[in-house]
Image (spheres, grey):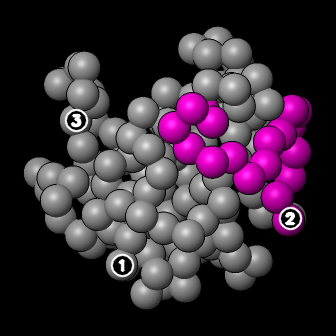
């Protein structure tokens, strides 16, 4: 299994790449990773994880990303990735997220990003889980 020290993104399916997996710091049997979605309207990263910084050069080589969509505030525990990418989070998780990461924008309800990506809030784990 690759570790977060590997620097390459892996292709999951055409247009979707994954960062190397990393173990959740407080639950070693859980792996986390980020996803890099290649889109004509601008690439998007989904989830913040340690693998995101280790894959930063590869992400920049692919044209970078227009935004990082976080699922919930706990992803902020990894801090800001080594990428110049604006971070977006649900409004209900913003106050917790800004303790560790700059937040460029928020969403409050289901919304489309361009015509090919939909953000759907599913509160439960945290108030703003999306």
Return the x and y of residue 2 as percentages of the image width and height.
14, 56
* Location of residue 129 by image quarter: top right
The answer to whether residue 58 is above or below residue 37 is below
- For label 2, the residue is 115
First reached walking from the N terminus: tag 2 or tag 1: 1
Label 1: how many Cα within 10 Å (few below 14, some 14–19, many 20+): some
Report whether 97 appears left or right of 74: right
Q: Residue at x 62, y 25 (%)?
A: 96
Spatial distance from mark 2 to mark 1, Cα to Cα?
28 Å
Question: Is 39 inside the magenta-drawn segment?
Answer: no
* Location of residue 19 by image quarter: bottom left
- In the image, the segment drawn in magenta is 97-114
Report whether 24 appears left or right of 11: left
Spatial distance from mark 3 to mark 1, Cα to Cα?
21 Å
Return the x and y of residue 103 as percentages of the image width and height.
69, 46
Disc 3 + disc 1, Cβ < 8 Å: no
Mark nearest the camera among 3 and 2 is: 3
């Amino acid at each position: 299994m690759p570790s977060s020290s590997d620097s390459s993104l892996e292709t999951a399916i055409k247009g979707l790449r994954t960062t190397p997996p990393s173990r959740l710091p407080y639950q070693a049997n859980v792996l986390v990773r980020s996803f890099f979605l290649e889109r004509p309207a601008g690439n998007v990263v989904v989830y913040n994880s340690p693998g995101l910084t280790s894959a930063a050069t590869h992400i920049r080589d692919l044209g970078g990303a227009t935004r990082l969509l976080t699922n919930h505030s706990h992803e902020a525990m990894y801090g800001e990735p080594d990428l110049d990418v604006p971070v977006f989070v649900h409004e209900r998780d913003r106050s917790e997220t800004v303790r560790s990461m700059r937040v460029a924008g928020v969403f409050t309800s289901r919304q489309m990003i361009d015509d090919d990506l939909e953000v759907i809030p599913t509160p439960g784990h945290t108030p703003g889980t999306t």
